[in-house]
């Protein structure tokens, strides 16, 4: 009997003996865990029964003259609309975001995967020959570079690292597969990036700790940027797949090399994991958008009370806010997200995330912890010049923010002015002035941080319905008497 074929991936199903729910042989698809798709998973007896029923139905159709079923035409094509994530296995079975994806006119124009925000890159010309066999057809790639892989004897051999939507691949210089590892199986990353100094000239080493298989240690001589890129990309994909942050541990290079378990397990051999292409991604994004059109608030791209655009925290940073009011699944009502430098009362600067909602200005530390929440309605005066923004808050204490781009200042200023008018019914006092004057940057003795609630897009729609404002209405002048000043 021929091995049964997975109707989604077109590959032969694997067989294993299980004790539950009924002892006996079971069929499963080896790619199901990688993609979280609804592949067949049934006992051999169930499969035989279904196969017999299907054959009987096909014979009846042919006998009745309805054209029958075309058989012997090769494997079934992949179901491009299969869900991409599965929470049952710690990986998303479908996109959990309620955001509509912005997609171009054609698959070829995709320059990033909107599910993660990671850039899509073509196969580099210098690697086109060794990658031709395993990575053809416009694959979804995020990283390609030469590296050196450590073997169990602690020696290094040259190789090629490729990072796709789900996996990390290691090829030898001729393109043969040495390792294919699912990113969701990684437990930790060990890195000597912060431990290696320029004076020591030590090679930069990192390791992927994979208890379910065996670890993988690589080095990138004199390339800190390459190590950092690998870590950043893998962390984003891991968070998208597992909905939690991947731990990165700073270690000395020698400690990494001595403590990683890179010896292959008995009878192990590399097995290629499926690589998606742009056409498949495009169809999945289209399907996601079509499925979500029934959610009214999903298409709301602005607050009609102020006309301000609604934005989301980039995928590359949203994992930092997973435990607070700005976590992605809440769909927080957010008008601005960006980086700035906050001046301290000692006149130094600290890097902070700046977030603006329909009521407050939030400052968050680099790990996402909120350290300041100031109601915009309590601002008395704003000064600005170039990349500098000075907010006077008499009831708390002032803040001086330096933004990375001068273009961000008028954007932030516009949001502050519109929200202030929404809350207070009057204009916010603003002045373009280089001299910041005397500011009180030190918190008063009895000041305590109070993190105000962050509304969601659904909260906004419910409020608009209650006030009789259409979510699609951009004309706000005649609605001023309906504005909620609470």
Image (cartoon, helix red, strand yellow):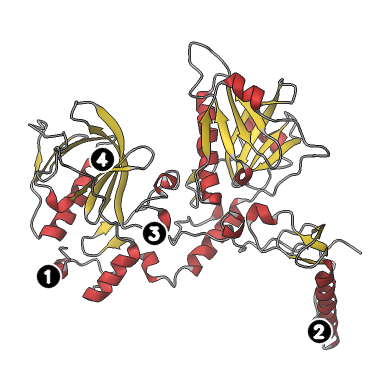
Q: Which residue position holds label 1? A: 481
Q: Up-down: is 176 above or below 422?
A: above
Q: For label 4, count other residues whose C-alpha is less than 10 Å away and answer few (under 14), some (14-19) or many (20+).
A: few
Cβ atoms under marks 4 and 1 closer than 8 Å: no
Q: CA distance from mark 3 to mark 2?
A: 50 Å
Residue 313 or residue 46, whichever sits in front: 46
Which quadrant would the C terminus be assigned to in this image?
bottom left
Q: Residue at x 53, y 56 (%)?
A: 106
Classify residue 73 as left or right of residue 315: right
Helix, strand or loop at mark 3: helix
* Residue sitting at x 74%, y 54%: 30
Q: Earlier in the sequence, mark 4 or mark 2?
A: 2
Q: To which quarter of the image does residue 267 belong?
A: top right
Single out the residue that lies furthest toward the top.
199
Nearer the N terminus, badge 1 or badge 3? 3
Q: Secondary structure at mark 4?
A: loop
Q: Which residue is mark 2?
A: 61
Q: Earlier in the sequence, mark 4 or mark 1?
A: 4
**Which quadrant is the N terminus positioned in?**
bottom right
Gap in Å between the C-alphas at discs 3 and 4?
Answer: 29 Å
Q: Nearer the viewer, mark 3 or mark 4?
A: 3
The mark that comes first in sequence, 3 or 2, is 2
Give the distance between the C-alpha atoms of the residues marked 4 and 1, in whole angstroms: 32 Å
For residue 82, side relative to residue 465 (left or right): right
Q: Read off the residue under disc 4.
A: 407
Question: Spatial distance from mark 4 to mark 2, Cα to Cα?
Answer: 66 Å
Give above or below for 148 relative to 410. Answer: above
Find disc 3 in the rendering and name its residue: 330
Residue 390 occupies quadrant? top left
Q: Nearer the viewer, residue 267 or 391?
A: 267
345 shown above or below 123: above
């Amino acid at each position: 009997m021929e091995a049964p074929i997975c109707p989604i991936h077109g590959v032969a199903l694997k067989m294993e003996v299980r004790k539950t729910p009924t002892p006996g042989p079971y069929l499963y698809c080896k790619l199901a865990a990688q993609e979280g798709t609804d592949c067949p998973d049934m006992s051999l007896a169930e499969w035989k029964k279904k196969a017999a029923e299907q054959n009987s139905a096909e014979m009846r159709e042919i006998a009745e003259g309805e054209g029958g079923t075309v058989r012997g035409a090769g494997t079934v094509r992949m179901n491009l609309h299969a869900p991409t994530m599965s929470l049952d296995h710690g990986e998303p079975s479908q996109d959990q975001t309620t955001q509509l994806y912005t997609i171009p006119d054609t698959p070829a124009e995709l320059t990033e995967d909107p599910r993660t925000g990671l850039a899509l890159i073509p196969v580099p010309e210098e690697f086109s020959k060794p990658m031709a066999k395993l990575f053809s057809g416009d694959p979804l790639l995020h990283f390609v570079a030469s590296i050196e892989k450590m073997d169990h004897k602690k020696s290094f051999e040259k190789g090629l690292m490729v990072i796709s939507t789900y996996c990390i691949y290691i090829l030898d210089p001729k393109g043969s597969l040495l390792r294919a590892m699912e990113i969701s199986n990684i437990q930790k990353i060990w890195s000597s990036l912060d431990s290696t100094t320029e004076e020591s000239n030590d090679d930069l080493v990192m390791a992927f700790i994979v208890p379910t298989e065996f670890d993988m240690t690589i080095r990138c001589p004199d390339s800190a940027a390459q190590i950092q890129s690998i870590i950043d990309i893998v962390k984003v994909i891991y968070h998208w797949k597992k909905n939690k942050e991947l731990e990165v541990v700073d270690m000395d290079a020698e400690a990494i090399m001595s403590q990683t378990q890179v010896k292959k397990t008995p009878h192990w051999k590399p097995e290629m994991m499926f690589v998606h292409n742009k056409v498949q991604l495009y169809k999945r994004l289209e399907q996601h958008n079509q499925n979500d059109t029934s959610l009214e608030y999903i298409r709301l791209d602005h607050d009609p009370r102020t006309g301000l655009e609604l934005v989301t925290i980039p995928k590359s940073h949203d994992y930092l806010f997973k435990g607070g009011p700005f976590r992605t699944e809440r769909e927080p009502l957010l008008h601005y997200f960006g980086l700035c430098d906050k001046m301290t009362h000692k006149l130094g600067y600290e890097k902070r995330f700046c977030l603006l909602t329909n009521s407050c200005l939030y400052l968050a530390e680099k790990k996402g912890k909120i350290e300041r929440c100031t109601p915009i309605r309590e601002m008395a005066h704003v000064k600005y010049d170039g990349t500098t923004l000075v907010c006077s808050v008499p009831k708390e204490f002032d803040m001086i923010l330096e933004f990375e781009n001068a273009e961000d200042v008028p954007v932030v200023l516009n949001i502050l002015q519109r929200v202030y008018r929404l809350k207070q019914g009057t204009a916010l006092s603003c002045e373009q002035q280089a001299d910041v004057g005397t500011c009180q940057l030190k918190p008063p003795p009895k000041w305590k941080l109070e993190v105000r609630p962050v509304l969601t897009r659904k909260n906004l729609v419910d409020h608009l319905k209650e006030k009789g404002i259409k979510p699609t209405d951009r004309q706000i002048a005649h609605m001023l008497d309906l504005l909620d000043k609470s």
